[in-house]
Image: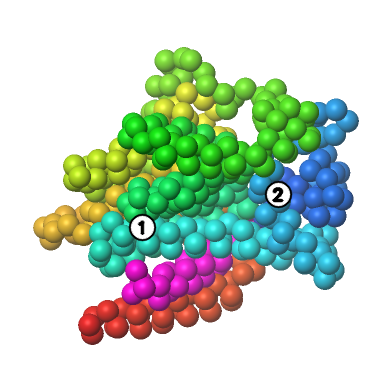
C-alpha cells in the first residue's frame, strides 16, 4: 500500500482545490440555518437558535425548525453544528465573524468541513479501489469521479449534513472492508462505531448499521458480532447524550421531538412507487440523468467473484436498503440539485466503477463511458457554480442552469485563488507519481 500514498495525497489536493474553487455566495445565503446554528453555538453557547445571530436570520418556527420548551431548535442532528463550530471558533476569536465577514466565514466553514471531508472521502475510495483491484489508474479514476462526476460536487459547497453522512459512512465501510479482508476484529469494532456515529450527523443513512449487522450475523461468527455490536453501541452514545440533555429522552431525536413525521416510514404502495419513479426514472430528477457514469459501477459490483460473496452482498445490500428506506418516506427532501437522498450509495457505486474500469472493454464501450463521464462532470459542475437550492418539482435543473451561466448570472467565489493553487499542486504531484509508476 505504500506505493499509493503519494497518489492519494495528489488526489486529496486536486479534489480539495476543485471543490474549494466552487464554494459560492448563493449557497452561503441559501443555507442560513446551518450558519445560524454554528454561530449560536460559538457565540452564545447554545444549540437553540438565536434571532439575528447571523445577518438576516429571523427566528421563526418553520418546516426546518421547531419549538421545544421555551427554545426553537433546528430539525437537524447536532454533529454538523459541532464540526462547523470547531472551524468557526478560532475565526471568531480573531474577530472574524458572520456579521462583518459573512461570505468569507461561511466559505471557510464550508471549506474546513464539507470540502476537506469529501477530499478525504475521495482518498478512501482510492485506497479501497486499489485494495480491491490492484490497479491504481482504475482506482484513481473512480476516486476523482466520485466527487467530481456526481451530486457530491454541488453539495460539497455547503456545510451539509448529508455530506457529513457520506464521510462517516465511508469511514465505516473502509473499516468493515479491511476488518473482513484482514480478519481483524478491532476494525469491525470501528466499522460499527462509525456506522452509528453517522447518525449523529444525519439520519439519512439509517440502514447502514442494520445492513452491516445483518451481513455480519449471516457469517455466524460470535466474536465478529460482539465487536461490531459494541462499536455500534459506542458510536450511538453521542446521539443519546445529546437527545437526553436537550429533549429529556436519549431515544428522542430532533425530528421526533419536533413531531415531524415526513421522514418516518409511510406504508403506502402509491407513495413507494412515486418515490422509486422520482429516484430511478423521472427525466427531471432520476440519478441516471445527473450521474450516468456511476451506473457502470453496477456492472462492476455484479462481477465480484463468489469467493468475495460477502463484499457483493455488502455492495448490493447497502444501495438496495437505502433505496427502500428513502422510498418509504413521505418526503423526497425538498429543494435539491439531483436526488440527494441517494448520496449515501455513491461510495458503493464508485467502488463498483473501479472494478469495472479494470476490465477489458471494446473501443465503443470506452467511448460511451468517456461521454458519460464528461456529461456527469459537466452536470456536477453546473450545480457547483450555481446552487443546490433548486425547487422541486421543476424543469431539469442542469438545463435551467446552463441558461443562467450563459447569461452571466453567477455567484461570488471567494475561495477560488486557494482552490487554483491546491489543484495545480495536486496535478503536479499526480504527474510525478504517475511517472514513477510508469518507470517501474
Percent x, y of residue 375: 34, 55
* 184 relative to 89 in the view: left or right: left
Percent x, y of residue 46: 83, 45
Q: Is residue 21 magenta?
A: yes
Residue at 13% of width from left, 59% of height from top? 360
Mark 1, other Cα within 10 Å: few <14 / some 14–19 / many ≥20: many
Q: CA distance from mark 1 to mark 2?
A: 29 Å
Classify 21 as above or below 226. below
Residue holding disc 1: 128
Quadrant of residue 101 within the rendered picture: bottom right
Percent x, y of residue 348: 36, 47
Classify 112 as above or below 246. below
Q: Is residue 241 magenta?
A: no
Percent x, y of residue 201: 61, 44
In this view of the protein, which residue sits in the foreground, 331 or 162?
A: 162
In this view of the protein, which residue sits in the foreground, 280 or 4?
A: 4
Residue at 49% of width from left, 63% of height from top? 119
Residue holding disc 2: 81
Residue at 74% of width from left, 61% of height from top? 88
Q: Secondary structure at mark 1?
A: helix
Which stretch did the figure color magenta? 1-27
Quadrant of residue 324 within the rendered picture: top left
In this view of the protein, which residue sits in the foreground, 310 or 88?
A: 310
Name the N-terminal-most of marks 1 and 2: 2
Q: Secondary structure at mark 2?
A: helix
Q: The N terminus appears in which quarter of the rendering?
A: bottom left
Amino acid at each position: 500500500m505504500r506505493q499509493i500514498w503519494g497518489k492519494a495525497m495528489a488526489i486529496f489536493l486536486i479534489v480539495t482545490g476543485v471543490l474549494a474553487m466552487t464554494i459560492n455566495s448563493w449557497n452561503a445565503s441559501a443555507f442560513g440555518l446551518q450558519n445560524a446554528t454554528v454561530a449560536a453555538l460559538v457565540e452564545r453557547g447554545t444549540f437553540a437558535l438565536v434571532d439575528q445571530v447571523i445577518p438576516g436570520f429571523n427566528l421563526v418556527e418553520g418546516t426546518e425548525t421547531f419549538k421545544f420548551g421555551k427554545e426553537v431548535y433546528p430539525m437537524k442532528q447536532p454533529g454538523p453544528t459541532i464540526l462547523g463550530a470547531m472551524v468557526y471558533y478560532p475565526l471568531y476569536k480573531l474577530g472574524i465573524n458572520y456579521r462583518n465577514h459573512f461570505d468569507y466565514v461561511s466559505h471557510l466553514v464550508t471549506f474546513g468541513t464539507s470540502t476537506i471531508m469529501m477530499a478525504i472521502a475521495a482518498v478512501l475510495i482510492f485506497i479501497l479501489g486499489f485494495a480491491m483491484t490492484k490497479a491504481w489508474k482504475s482506482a484513481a479514476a473512480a476516486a476523482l469521479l466520485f466527487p467530481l462526476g456526481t451530486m457530491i460536487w454541488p453539495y460539497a459547497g455547503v456545510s451539509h449534513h448529508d455530506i457529513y453522512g457520506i464521510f462517516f459512512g465511508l469511514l465505516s465501510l473502509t473499516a468493515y472492508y479491511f476488518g473482513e479482508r484482514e480478519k481483524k476484529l478491532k476494525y469491525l469494532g470501528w466499522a460499527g462505531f462509525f456506522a452509528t456515529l453517522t447518525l449523529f450527523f444525519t439520519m439519512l443513512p439509517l440502514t447502514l448499521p442494520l445492513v452491516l449487522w445483518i451481513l455480519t450475523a449471516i457469517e455466524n461468527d460470535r466474536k465478529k458480532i460482539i465487536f461490531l455490536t459494541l462499536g455500534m453501541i459506542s458510536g450511538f452514545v453521542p446521539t443519546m447524550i445529546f437527545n437526553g440533555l436537550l429533549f429529556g429522552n436519549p431515544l428522542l431525536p430532533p425530528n421526533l421531538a419536533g413531531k415531524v413525521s415526513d421522514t418516518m416510514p409511510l406504508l403506502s404502495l402509491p407513495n413507494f412507487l412515486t418515490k422509486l419513479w422520482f429516484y430511478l426514472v423521472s427525466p427531471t430528477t432520476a440519478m441516471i440523468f445527473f450521474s450516468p457514469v456511476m451506473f457502470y459501477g453496477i456492472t462492476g459490483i455484479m462481477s465480484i467473484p463468489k469467493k468475495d460473496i460477502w463484499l457483493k452482498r455488502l455492495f448490493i445490500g447497502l444501495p438496495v436498503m437505502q433505496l427502500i428506506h428513502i422510498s418509504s418516506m413521505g418526503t423526497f427532501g425538498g429543494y435539491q440539485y439531483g436526488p440527494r437522498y441517494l448520496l449515501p450509495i455513491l461510495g458503493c457505486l464508485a467502488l463498483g466503477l473501479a472494478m469495472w474500469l479494470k476490465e477489458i472493454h471494446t473501443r465503443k464501450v470506452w467511448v460511451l463511458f468517456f461521454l458519460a463521464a464528461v456529461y456527469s462532470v459537466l452536470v456536477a459542475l453546473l450545480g457547483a457554480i450555481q446552487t443546490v437550492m433548486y425547487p422541486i418539482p421543476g424543469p431539469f435543473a442542469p438545463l435551467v442552469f446552463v441558461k443562467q451561466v450563459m447569461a452571466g448570472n453567477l455567484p461570488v467565489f471567494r475561495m477560488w485563488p486557494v482552490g487554483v493553487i491546491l489543484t495545480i499542486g495536486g496535478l503536479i504531484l499526480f504527474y510525478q507519481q504517475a511517472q514513477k509508476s510508469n518507470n517501474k
